[in-house]
Image: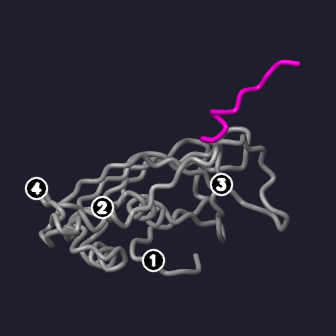
Amino acid sequence: MNAQFEFTKILQTESLGDSAKHVRLEANSDERAALADRFELRAVESLVGNLIIERIKGSELIRVRGRMSAEISQECVVSGKIVVSTIEERVNERFGQSNKTGFEVELSVEEDPPEQIENGEIDLGETIVQYLGVAIDPYPRAPGAEIPQQYQLEMETDVEIRKNPFEVLTSVRYEDD
């Protein structure tokens, strides 16, 4: 892998046989501190991934699935108090090699393309971290924290309510020829 990430756990894809491999990842204190800086959190108290890695039969793809759990601390956006959150996410990713023209894998419309395998490596740690990053509440609020009344009124008056541009069509009557 080219980039250095805070929580790097490399899987060499050539070491993966035909049977599924179970992997447990747990970030140490230095890695958690670096992740807290990356995501602008007060702390990452824990970060654990329990994964199953396997080759998808009939394809060149590798599936990484399992669970990611974390406990984080961040500041309430209203009061500044510490908010502790437990995050649990299902992990489900596919990885594959590409050629110069792109992936040669048939995908259904609903599926995202597989992640790129670089130099025969998959960074399982960064995969877990990306799930964490998406799951973090960007506006955490402590229990009972309410926006002061003066700001609620300001927010309500600043919002312009737009009419549905197709609403006018509800009054149109079509007649049969």
Circle 4 sits on which residue?
A: 144
Calculate the distance from the C-alpha at mark 1 to the C-alpha at mark 3: 20 Å
What's under tag 2, amino acid-wise? Leu
Residue 12 sits in quarter: bottom right
In this figure, which colouring scheme has been used for the structure?
Answer: one colour
What's under tag 3, amino acid-wise? Pro
Give the left or right position of residue 151, taking residue 121 as reference: left
- Within 10 Å of disc 2 (Cα), the crowding (few <14, some 14-19, many 20+) is many
Give the left or right position of residue 149, taking residue 55 as reference: left
1 and 3 marks in contact (CB < 8 Å): no
Q: Which residues are magenta?
A: 167-177
Residue 132 sits in quarter: bottom left
Q: Secondary structure at mark 4?
A: loop
Q: Position of residue 27 (x, y in %)?
A: 31, 67
Q: Secondary structure at mark 3?
A: loop
Q: Earlier in the sequence, mark 3 or mark 2?
A: 2
How many marks overall? Answer: 4
- Within 10 Å of disc 3 (Cα), the crowding (few <14, some 14-19, many 20+) is some
Circle 3 sits on which residue?
A: 114
Q: Earlier in the sequence, mark 4 or mark 3?
A: 3
Q: Position of residue 91 (x, y in %)?
A: 46, 49
Calculate the distance from the C-alpha at mark 3 to the C-alpha at mark 2: 24 Å
Residue 9 is covered by the magenta coloring: no
Circle 1 sits on which residue?
A: 5
What's under tag 4, amino acid-wise? Gly
Which label lies toward us, 4 or 3? 4
For the C terminus, the quadrant is top right
Circle 2 sits on which residue?
A: 47
What's under tag 1, amino acid-wise? Phe
